[in-house]
Image: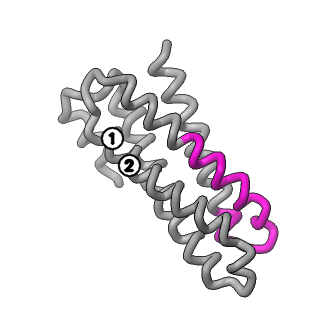
């Protein structure tokens, strides 16, 4: 979203993170949620969809966790750093698990390649924010 940072500039509860950091995180999470959902649907349409069932399930789990993380960060949740940290850790795990399976299919399916790339970026973003929160 082009105005994400401007939105965060208007809010007072930001979990101790700058508007730029939060905006980047929310935008990354939004992209990840969209891509993993599309990847799951792409895998459902493949001839080997049954073999891809574990990856489809992980993508759908990842989309749900990432979406929840995006909403928690958007709210800011005030000073409750423990809740934000726990949600980011869940998001990191979901992205890593989705990446692990989609990266195995990336050579054969463009949607899996895109999914592997975005889940890696999202996991990296979660690690960075967790590091910033716990300094």
Marks 2 and 1 sit apart, C-alpha to C-alpha, by 6 Å
In this image, 76 relative to 119: left or right?
left
* Residue at figure coordinates x 60%, y 38% from the top left: 124
Q: Which residues are magenta?
A: 92-114
Q: Residues within 10 Å of mark 1 (few under 14, many from 20)?
A: some
Q: Is residue 68 left or right of residue 116?
A: left
Q: Where is residue 36 drawn, in percent x and y?
A: 55, 62
Q: In the current view of this chain or complex, which residue is farthest to the top?
A: 135
Task: Identify the element where label 1 is drawn.
Answer: helix
The residue at the point 79 percent across, 73 percent down is 108
Image spot of residue 3 (x, y percent): 29, 49
Label placed on residue 72: 1
Marks 2 and 1 close (CB-CB < 8 Å):
yes
Between 57 and 4, the one nearer to me in the picture:
57
Which mark is drawn over residue 116?
Answer: none
From this view, report whether residue 128 is shown above or below residue 1. Answer: above
Q: Quadrant of the N terminus?
A: bottom left
- Colour theme: one colour
**73 is higher (above) or lower (below) than 81:** below
Q: Total of numbered circles in the picture? A: 2
The rendered magenta stretch, by its main secondary structure, is classed as helix
Judge whether 113 appears above or below 70 on screen. Answer: below
Report the front residue among 86 and 17.
86
Mark 2 nearby-residue class (10 Å; few <14, some 14–19, many ≥20): some
- In magenta segment, residue 14: no
Indicate the position of residue 77 as horizontal and vertical percent values.
Answer: 27, 32
Residue 28: give x, y in percent of width and height. Answer: 48, 48
Q: Which residue is mark 2?
A: 68
Left or right: residue 118 compared with residue 47:
left
| Residue at 28% across, 33% down | 76
Looking at the rendered structure, the secondary structure element under dot 2 is: helix
């Amino acid at each position: 979203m082009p105005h994400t940072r401007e939105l965060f500039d208007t809010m007072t509860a930001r979990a101790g993170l700058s508007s730029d950091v939060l905006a980047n995180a929310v935008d990354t999470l939004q992209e990840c949620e969209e891509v993993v959902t599309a990847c799951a649907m792409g895998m459902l349409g493949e001839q080997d969809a049954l073999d891809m069932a574990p990856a489809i399930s992980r993508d759908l789990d990842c989309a749900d966790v990432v979406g929840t993380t995006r909403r928690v960060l958007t709210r800011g949740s005030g000073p409750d750093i423990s809740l934000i940290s726990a949600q980011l850790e869940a998001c990191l795990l979901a992205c890593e698990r989705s990446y692990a399976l989609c990266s195995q299919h990336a050579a054969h399916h463009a949607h899996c390649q895109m999914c592997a790339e975005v889940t890696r970026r999202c996991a990296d973003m979660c690690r960075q924010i967790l590091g910033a929160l716990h300094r």
